[in-house]
Amino acid sequence: MRKYFGTDGIRGRANGVITPELALKVGQAAGLVFQRGDHRHRVVIGKDTRLSGYMIETAMVAGFTSVGMDVLLLGPMPTPAVAMLTRSMRADIGVMISASHNPFEDNGIKIFGPDGFKLSDEVEREIEHLIDADLQTKLAGSTDLGRAKRIESVHARYIEFAKRTLPRNLTLDGLRVVVDCANGAAYRVAPETLWELGAEVISIGTDPDGFNINRDVGSTAPEALVAKVRELRADIGIALDGDADRVLVVDEKGQRVDGDQLMAVVARSWQEDARLSKNGIVATIMSNLGLERYLGGLGLGMVRTAVGDRYVLEHMREHGYNLGGEQSGHIIMSDYATTGDGLVAALQLLSVVQRQQRPVSEVCHCFDPLPQVLKNVRYRSGGEPLRQDAVVTAIEGARQRLGEGGRLVIRPSGTEPVIRVMAEGDDRDLVVRVVDDVVEALRKVAA
């Protein structure tokens, strides 16, 4: 078990878990781990729009400069932009200060290596060891301290990067697009990118005040986007989350399109264009069985990993896949990016829509999802309800009842003391009963 890092960096309540002291130590520890060679080392730091970002950013600057690293401050930028700029600016480390889709009270620290990829478990453990160590003797001397400066041109660089993922002659002319930026990190770059490509753009969730990130907007609260698409009779709605590494789409009828359908659209398009590096994609244990069956009908395979885009990406890199993602909207296209990129994923979908000249509702309805039920059970931190005999028995019985035509997934959350129970199958009533029985067993133990 790691003490600080979860499935997606370090995350928790700002000024509770994520304190200035911790941010300072993370900066020092990560800076020491990535000091390799005699060159002048540098780190790029981006953030979303949370009020606590100022506090954490300042503390991390102090940490990195105290071990002799120069700091380039990007300001509010999407997570995938930070990963891209880490490579582009030849930095030794990239840092994104964000708690993604969490409410503003939370914040987090994501770290990228010089290649723009998230860190391995081994490197994170090395950083954790240094966080708890006495680093006083490892600090830089007075003449070797780092410098910090703010970089102003990064928005234009990311917009150009995003546009170059499309064919040069493809435009979005004639499309009315509603984009919801969740009052988060993409509030400037996403509308500008779509406008420069020729779309008629209506923006919501682009007025961050430090407190309203993800509040009733964004990919985790798409009701506002659905209403706006219907009101304006738009062709498509695009909702990003707080750090813009995931996306949810709404078609012209106001119906939601999740990451599974997006992966199906892109997989089929790339198969037709001979762009898939392997004969399949990588998804997680949470992706719908309907996606797996659809891809099978196309002659494509689907490999499942643990939940978390980092695990999807690790499998993609190890086995040579260039497309993968999560049902939640993390879509990873390794030809373009080293992490999930909500804007780039949306652009790939829009390119298919423009080429086919069909409504989004038709393009994105690749398969009928199997009935899938997901429920969460909260337990006391430190407990181990999944080891209890009554829970083990309930889970075994549920799997037997579902049989080979269904799936049961039980997993602890990587960010909070919650166990997620998901089941799917052709018989919705059976799926509901199975989930309820397991949840009831867990609740009795947790109580």
Image (cartoon, rainbow, N blue to C red):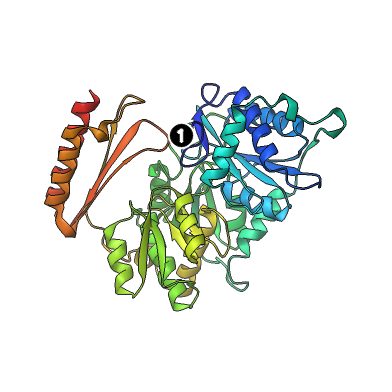
Q: Which residue occupies 50% across, 66% down?
A: 320
Quarter of the picture holding the N terminus: top left
Quadrant in the picture for residue 378: top left
**Residue 430 on image: x %, y %:** 12, 49
Q: Nearer the viewer, residue 355 or 444?
A: 444
Q: Nearer the viewer, residue 191 or 247?
A: 247
**Residue 446 on image: x %, y %:** 24, 26
**Residue 279 on image: x %, y %:** 41, 73
Left or right of residue 300, residue 3 in this image: right
Left or right of residue 115, residue 386 in this image: left
Quadrant in the picture for residue 75: top right
Quadrant in the picture for residue 45: top right
What is the number of callouts on the image?
A: 1
Residue 231 appearing in the image = yes
Q: Secondary structure at mark 1?
A: loop
**Residue 403 on image: x %, y %:** 15, 56
Q: Which residue occupies 37% across, 38% down?
A: 413
Q: Which residue occupies 15% across, 39% down?
A: 393
Q: Nearer the viewer, residue 346 or 148?
A: 148
Point out the residue furthest to the right here.
143
Disc 1 residue type (three-letter): Arg
Residue under label 1? 215
Residue 212 appearing in the image = no
| Residue 326 vertical position relative to residue 59 in the rendered view, above or below | below
- Give the crowd class for mark 1: few <14, some 14-19, many >=20 residues within 10 Å: some
Quarter of the picture holding the C terminus: top left
| Residue 210 vertical position relative to residue 251 in the rendered view, above or below | above
